[in-house]
Amino acid sequence: MRIKINFYSPTQVSIPINYQHYLSSAIYNFLEINNKKFATLLHNGDHISTSKKFKFFTFSWLQIPKRKIIDSKIEILSNEFFWYISSPWEEFLINLLNGLLKEGSLRIGDKKFEIKQIETMSDFDKLSSFKKIKFKCLSPIVITTKKQIDNRPAKYYYKPDDDKLEISEKIRQNLINKYKTFYNKNPKDENLIINFDENYIKSSKAQVLVHYIKNKLDIKIPAIMCPFEAEGSQDLIRFGYECGFGELNSAGFGMVGRI
């Protein structure tokens, strides 16, 4: 399930262009307002006993209908904008919803935005019988591997012009690992193929470099922002829709919407 949050915005308000870390912090703040113990366990990775510390939620970039980029700022020209948060984890969503209702606003830097409306969405149920679904990225997808760089192993971030089958397989394996960890069982069907839009993937828009601010460090994360078609396991497609495709989902990567 996912949550859609509508915010009121005075016109011509500016926020930093690199705002994702504010959204991540806000989620933990909303959780803490309602249930401090749950928020602390999740933040520290103590909510799960396995070595794979998946947090089982993702969120979108801010969906701002009218905006303008000026230097390192986004000028919001709409009177409202939207934010999506998604998870298959009911306890997470309940605590988040209650925290949102209690807080009533979102802070991004020195700006505060009033919550106008909160909607719960379960629209994926309408497609539960489909094994081939087209998606657009609401936040970019991160996929990594280990490669020999300068004769030593290093983390490599996949780019749009890398091997498409290799990228697809990495996304599939990541989803299987998350699914097994969350449900403590294998999906009935482990087949999944991700086909990126062949024309879009060749454009400059398909590759983004996200500046994620953590502990005052500017962490540069290459990612892919491209429509794609997911074909195969209904369980894995649904889990990707709810939990995020690719890695770093809880930092705001890999959220998708239906086309």
Image: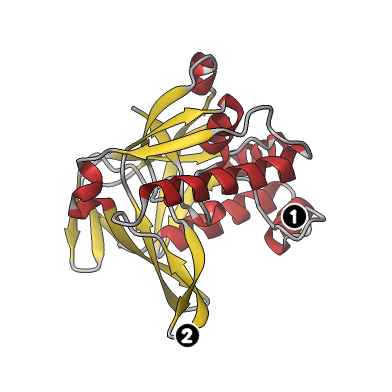
Residue positioned 40% across, 64% down in the render: 110
Colour scheme of the rendered structure: secondary structure
Tell me if 19 is positioned left or right of 215 in this view: left
Q: Residue furthest right?
A: 49
Q: Amino acid at mark 2?
A: Asn
The disc, 1 or 2, on the residue closer to the chain's N-terminal end is: 1
> In screen coordinates, is 57 left or right of 134?
right
Q: Which residue is labeled 1 in the image?
A: 36
Q: Quadrant of residue 135?
A: top left
| Picture quarter with the N terminus | top right
Label 1, label 2: how far apart the Cα atoms are: 45 Å
Rendered image quadrant of residue 71: bottom left
Q: Residues within 10 Å of mark 1 (few under 14, many from 20)?
A: some
Q: Nearer the viewer, residue 75 or 213?
A: 213
Name the residue: 53% across, 51% down. 249
**Mark 1 is on which residue type?**
Lys
Look at the image and tell me whether residue 151 can be seen: yes
Count of number-bearing discs: 2
Task: Judge left or right: residue 202 versus residue 27.
Answer: left
Residue 21, given in percent of the width and then of the height, sits at 47, 62
Q: Position of residue 103 (x, y in %)?
A: 57, 47
Whether residue 6 is visible, yes or no, is no
Element marked by disc 2: loop
The image shows residue 116, relative to residue 159, as above or below, that is: above
Question: Where residue 239 appears, x then y in whole percent?
Answer: 59, 35
**Which element carries disc 1, helix, strand or loop?**
helix
The numbered dot on residue 167 is: none
- Mark 2: few, some, or many residues within 10 Å (few <14, many ≥20)? few
Mark carried by residue 151: 2
